[in-house]
């Protein structure tokens, strides 16, 4: 397959019928809703969605309502990859027997950071190892937001959550975010990429490319939650964009093992002066308020910045910069 | 039908081969492993068209089964003990998703301490899940019931998953002669392919597994309750049709030498074989004793059991299972409850036997009988007693 992403223009897809209807009950300013809508813009053939338990699942399907206009199935929290494996197998077998007649069917799995980094990683790893033809989309808002903002393996360093609160002794989460994308890349599947709803054309192109891969594909989407991250809901897209501009969430793809920076991060690679200090991102959010008040904690900011720089440098090396 | 000598696990695997399911998702665990291995052979040799998903855990096995069944596929799996317990969360969801998965369980003791041998507590634990739950006395029953389970579960009035128990090692690893049902016969019996009215369908999309809050949850659960109730009749119908096909008679509750009995053993699974032999030997000595075998544990056929108790002086329940801190044995508590509703009050002696695969011999059944009869003659009940335990 080509290691190039398809060239998708927003104007070409924005007027297509949407498969994710309005009227769902995600919070105002929730980036997961924007992400879900953008993902469905990449659909071009029969498609099914499998959703791990989480905000997107709960808020889009409160009985007797559903926001989904494609077949959609939720079973539990930790097993969306296994559920999708079963469906992929069922479609294969029933196609062989002539029972299933819809032809090639795309399979999309949605999991949040808790459902992916933590409780769902075993089922995900198993599905990738077995090679099921599906696209797993991690929408990562950095905590168990649905249950009330508990820390996950995806929670960034220092963030104050309800289970890693910033106290008078311990300043929020003491670990860095688990390098989930690198862990997935180590499975040597054909398509792994990161994306952000702040860059819709890039996200949609990556969804399409991931679905067109024969075998498993993985997309790590930076999302945001104004309730858990504590910022102005009007700024959710601006906010996820900053995650990329500070290189906390660089955009890249690994297609057939070939690392490639996507345009927003490539710009920074070519002109490092465009890389914003991490502080620009941290200072907007309540979850890092203790980094700045009552006293400014340069020590904590530096620890976090150093780790972000290190991971960015490693990525630059892998992408040939 | 060909007569062959096979282990219980092989008997189940041959039944699955006859059915040729669309999807089998399974994980190995002793003593169920042979089922998975044998099915892998059938896949490798092209003898089935099944998509065989070798998942990374039992939790994922049941999850993949729920997914596949939601897509309209005919689905089979197997498990036991600790693996089954890892599935538990999804076992309940399989029932509420109304996915007619068939699962064979090579019943095994629960950790801890770890033990790989026979015990039925593993399957009895999910009595509250909504699954239809059957137990097998021998390998032929394990084979037959695996095939019948598809017809029961997939019936539009039922749409529930079905579990088939076979005692770990005692059946799973013991060779017995069975008559194996051919694919032609099996598919003629259950239907060539599953017809699911509601499923994941890209032409008619539906959402499955929605959040039901206080306003709808009870109604959703009541549908499982109602399906369990409707299944009673369907189970009997399927058993009757099976008898027409094979000549082998199945009933939810079976009796042996009960017409003039004053006392009865009540048991499930392979223990019924020992009890039957004991009845023969005691009858030869003039004892008026019979056997009631519970084949279908859920739904519980209490009326059928109590009808058999009408003229009894005492019943002796024998269970290879135990509930700590409970009011007695597991199914014996169900039986006592059913008896209470009828006003019948035979004396009751409750025994727990053979946990973790400990042998219980025919002479033990004799001794359990006489111990119970002595108490009954004094008008006493015997509370739950662990037979063979070194105190």
Image: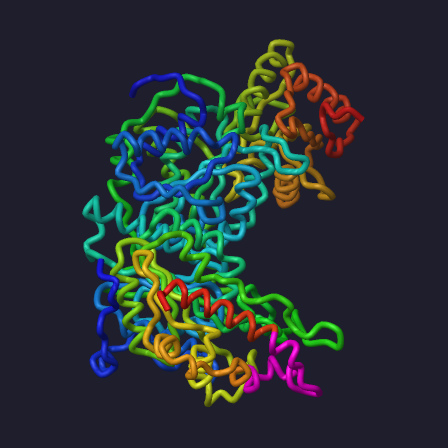
Q: Position of residue B61 (x, y in %)?
A: 44, 46
- Numbered circles on residues, count: 0
Say if the magenta span includes residue A289: yes
Q: Which residues are magenta?
A: A282-302
Q: Is residue A167 left or right of residue A257?
A: right
Q: Position of residue B219 (x, y in %)?
A: 48, 64
Q: Is residue B236 left or right of residue A39?
A: right
Above or below, A186 against B15 in this view is below
Q: Residue at x 53, y 52 (%)?
A: B89
Above or below, A212 against A19 in this view is above
* One can see residue B234 in this view: no
Q: Nearer the viewer, residue B8 or A158?
A: A158
Q: Nearer the viewer, residue B244 or B131?
A: B131
Q: Position of residue B376 (x, y in %)?
A: 74, 26
Q: Which quarter of the figure has residue B384? A: top right
Say if the magenta span includes residue B218: no
Q: Quadrant of the C terminus of chain A?
A: bottom left
Q: Quadrant of the N terminus of chain A?
A: bottom left
Q: Nearer the viewer, residue A317 or B288?
A: A317
Asked which colour scheme the image uses, the reply is: rainbow
Q: Is residue A70 left or right of residue A300?
A: left
Farthest top residue? B284
Q: Which quarter of the figure has residue B108? A: top right
Q: Residue at x 77, y 25 (%)?
A: B375
Q: Residue at x 53, y 59 (%)?
A: A118
Q: Position of residue A303 (x, y in %)?
A: 61, 73
């Amino acid at each position: 397959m080509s290691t190039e992403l398809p060239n998708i223009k927003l104007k070409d897809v924005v007027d297509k019928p949407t498969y994710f209807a309005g009227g769902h009950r995600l919070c105002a300013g929730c980036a997961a809703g924007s992400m879900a809508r953008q993902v469905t813009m990449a659909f071009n053939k029969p498609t099914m969605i499998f959703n791990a338990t989480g905000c997107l699942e709960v808020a889009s399907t409160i009985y007797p309502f559903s926001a989904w206009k494609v077949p959609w199935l939720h079973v539990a929290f930790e097993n969306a990859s296994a559920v999708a494996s079963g469906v992929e197998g069922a479609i294969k077998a029933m196609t062989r027997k002539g029972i299933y007649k819809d032809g090639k069917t795309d399979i999309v799995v949605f999991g949040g950071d808790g459902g992916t980094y933590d409780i769902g990683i075993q089922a995900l790893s198993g599905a990738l190892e077995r090679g099921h033809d599906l696209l797993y989309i991690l929408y990562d808002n950095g905590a168990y937001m649905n249950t009330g903002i508990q820390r996950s393996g995806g929670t960034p360093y220092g963030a104050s959550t309800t289970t890693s609160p910033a106290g008078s002794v311990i300043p929020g989460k003491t670990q860095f975010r688990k390098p989930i994308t690198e862990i997935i890349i180590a499975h040597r599947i054909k398509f792994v990429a990161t994306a952000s709803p702040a860059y819709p054309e890039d996200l949609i192109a990556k969804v399409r490319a991931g679905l067109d891969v024969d075998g498993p594909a993985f997309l790590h989407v930076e999302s945001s939650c104004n309730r858990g991250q504590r910022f102005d809901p009007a700024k959710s897209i601006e906010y996820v964009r900053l995650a990329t501009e500070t290189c906390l969430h660089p955009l890249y793809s690994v297609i057939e093992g070939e690392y490639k920076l996507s345009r927003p991060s490539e710009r920074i690679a070519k002109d490092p002066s465009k890389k914003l200090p991490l502080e620009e991102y941290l200072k907007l959010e309540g979850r890092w308020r203790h980094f700045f008040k009552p006293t400014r904690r340069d020590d904590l900011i530096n620890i976090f910045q150093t780790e972000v720089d290190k991971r960015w440098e490693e990525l630059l090396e892998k992408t040939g910069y | 039908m060909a007569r062959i000598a096979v282990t219980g696990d092989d008997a189940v695997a041959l039944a699955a081969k006859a059915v040729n399911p669309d999807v089998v998702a399974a994980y190995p665990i002793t003593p169920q492993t042979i089922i998975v291995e044998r099915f892998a052979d059938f896949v490798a040799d092209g003898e089935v068209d099944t998509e065989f998903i070798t998942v990374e855990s039992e939790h994922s096995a049941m999850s993949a089964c729920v997914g596949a069944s939601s897509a309209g596929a005919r689905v089979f799996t197997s498990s036991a003990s600790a693996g089954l317990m890892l599935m538990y969360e999804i076992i309940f969801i399989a029932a509420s998703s109304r996915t007619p998965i068939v699962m064979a369980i090579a019943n095994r003791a629960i950790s801890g301490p770890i033990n790989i041998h026979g015990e039925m507590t593993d399957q009895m634990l999910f009595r509250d899940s909504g699954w239809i739950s059957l137990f097998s006395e021998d390998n032929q029953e394990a084979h037959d019931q695996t095939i019948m389970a598809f017809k029961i579960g997939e019936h539009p009035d039922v749409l529930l998953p079905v579990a088939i128990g076979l005692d770990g090692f005692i059946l799973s690893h013991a060779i017995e002669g069975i008559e194996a049902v051919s694919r032609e016969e099996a598919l003629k019996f259950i239907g060539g392919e599953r017809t699911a009215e509601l499923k994941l369908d890209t032409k008619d999309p539906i959402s499955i597994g929605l959040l039901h809050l206080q306003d709808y949850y009870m109604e959703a659960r009541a549908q499982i309750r109602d399906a369990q109730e409707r299944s009673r009749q369907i189970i009997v119908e399927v058993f009757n049709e099976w008898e027409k096909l094979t000549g082998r008679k199945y009933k939810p509750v079976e009796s042996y030498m009960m017409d003039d009995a004053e006392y009865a053993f009540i048991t499930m699974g392979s223990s019924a074989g020992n009890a039957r032999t004991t009845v023969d030997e005691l009858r030869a000595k003039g004892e008026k004793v019979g056997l009631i075998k519970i084949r279908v544990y859920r739904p519980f056929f209490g009326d059928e059991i109590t009808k058999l108790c009408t003229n009894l002086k005492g019943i002796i329940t024998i269970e290879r299972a135990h509930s700590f801190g409970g009011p007695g044995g597991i199914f014996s508590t169900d039986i006592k409850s059913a008896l209470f509703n009828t006003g019948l009050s035979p004396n009751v002696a409750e025994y727990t036997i053979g946990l973790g695969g400990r042998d219980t011999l025919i002479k033990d059944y004799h001794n359990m009988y006489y111990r119970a009869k002595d108490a009954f003659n004094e008008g006493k009940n015997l509370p739950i007693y662990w037979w063979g335990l070194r105190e």
